[in-house]
Amino acid sequence: MTDHHSPASGCGCDRRGFMATIGAGLGTLVFQPALAQTTGKNHRLKEPASVWVAFLYTPSDILRKPGQWWSWPGNDFDAEGRQRQYTNALRGIAEKLAISLEFCDSPLHDESGADQFIRRVIQAHPDGLLLIPLFNGSFNLLDRILAATSPEADPLIPAIVFCCLGVHHGSIVKYQRQGVHYIQSLDNMDAVEYGLKMIQARKFMANSRILSVAGTEDGQEAVVPFWGTTVRTVSLRRFEEEVNKTAITPEVEQLAREFKINAHKILEPADPEILQAARVHFANRRLLEAEQGDAMMMDCLRRGELMPCMSFMTLRDQGIAAGCENDLGPTLTLMLVQQLFNRPGFQHNPCYETERNHYFASHCTSASRLFGIEQPQEKYLLRNYGHTNDPTCCPQVLFRPGEEVTMARCIPEAEPQMLLYSGKVVKSYDMPPVGGCRTNVEITINEWDDACQVKGHHNVLFYGHFAPRLKQFCRFYGIQVMT
């Protein structure tokens, strides 16, 4: 392999109460004390996803010999030129995504070359393969490579297959399976980019750390089945101490001003509550930095003036997953959706509008940059938290009517599952007269004639029709999709 391209790339709970608290959100995770913060995975020195690229075709100089049969795509198809075209495009994608692509020296065109490639792949075990057949007669080599790296093989190495339209004829159903992402389309580099992004997202999830702010224990760790994500505990006492020692600096005051300036309207909260919300955010950022966290979740109910709702909106708007109520499934979902689609989301409680046959989602925080973290904020109101009389500040984000949405929830078990739905925004309600939590949105549901059949609690809602793409990710990595 040559032409390597790697871009620079205070809680009064006892221990029993703590374990009960996290049990509902973290399922069967078993926590152990961490030996040291630097043991295991290094959460700052993350390596980029590594993908090996190979082209499969018989060179034209061989096919031009007398008696040779060109088959599909035919003798006017320039395979060598197409290889140069795709290679240049892939280098640009690799730089954009900050992944590592390693290109095979020359096209694979016989069993000896394919077997040598297989041996090197199994030894190196990259995060994935990108196989590009440019000759119909090379599909026996493609099948040989896929068989050696399939789920039945050890180890599984997932493979993207990119076949230009008109290169191959016949059924491709056998390629629509776990471990293979098959693309057959004319020069569709956007589809290839998404395939590479799936590999990148899977690597990110396995090398990330979620801070679980809950209970009385600091520094215990557990690994999420299948995903490989580390969950590290931070006690509620430490969180409270971090907020209490947060000085009212110019940066804190500036964030509080931004909360006010950017708000469409300010209803209940006064300046002290808004300033306190900014202090909570800076405390959360320091915890993430100190513990090398890539995401966080919190046992946030009944925190009084320490409610993190504005901080969680801000973190999500910055591309950092922040899960309510210390619930692992939606936190993983927020992380995954951010990596795949650059869309922060809305974790929520479910409700149902029976007379209009719609789904109603409601919670006291949401991302506001729902079109992407570089995009403008949707309108939001500054409200108090909807379920306490303590002085608090949280956002009521107003979803845009008519926008397509996707709703998902990872179910983090050893045999992974994902709930998946799609629909459109109908409206966000004034509160009052509607009840529930501060941010709310009514949506249609595409997958069921009866919206009351929607499953799940704390599902994550986000802008865009991404259900087909999420289904591709789930099939690629063997995740069962449920509706």
Image: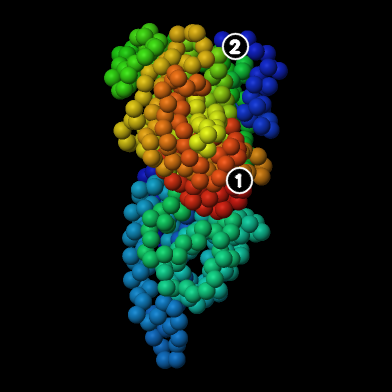
Q: Considering the numbered disc 1 on the image, is that residue within a helix, a strand or a loop?
A: strand
Identify the image's colour scheme: rainbow, by chain, secondary structure or one colour: rainbow
* Residue at mark 2: 11
User: What's the residue at 62%, 48% (across, down)?
Assistant: 480
* Residue at mark 1: 482
> Mark 2 or 1 closer to N-term?
2
Quadrant in which the N terminus appears = bottom left
Label 1: few (<14), some or many (≥20) within 10 Å? few
Q: Nearer the viewer, residue 351 or 43?
A: 351
Label 2: few (<14), some or many (≥20) within 10 Å? some
User: What's the residue at 50%, 27% (across, down)?
Assistant: 362
| The quadrant where residue 216 appears | top right
Residue 1 in the image: above or below residue 218 = below
Q: Amino acid at mark 1?
A: Met
**Residue 401: % across, % down:** 38, 36
Q: Residue furthest left?
A: 261
Residue 178 in sight from this viewpoint: yes
User: What's the residue at 63%, 44% (across, down)?
Assistant: 416
Q: Residue furthest right?
A: 16
Left/right placement of residue 152 relative to residue 99 reads right
Q: Amino acid at mark 2?
A: Cys
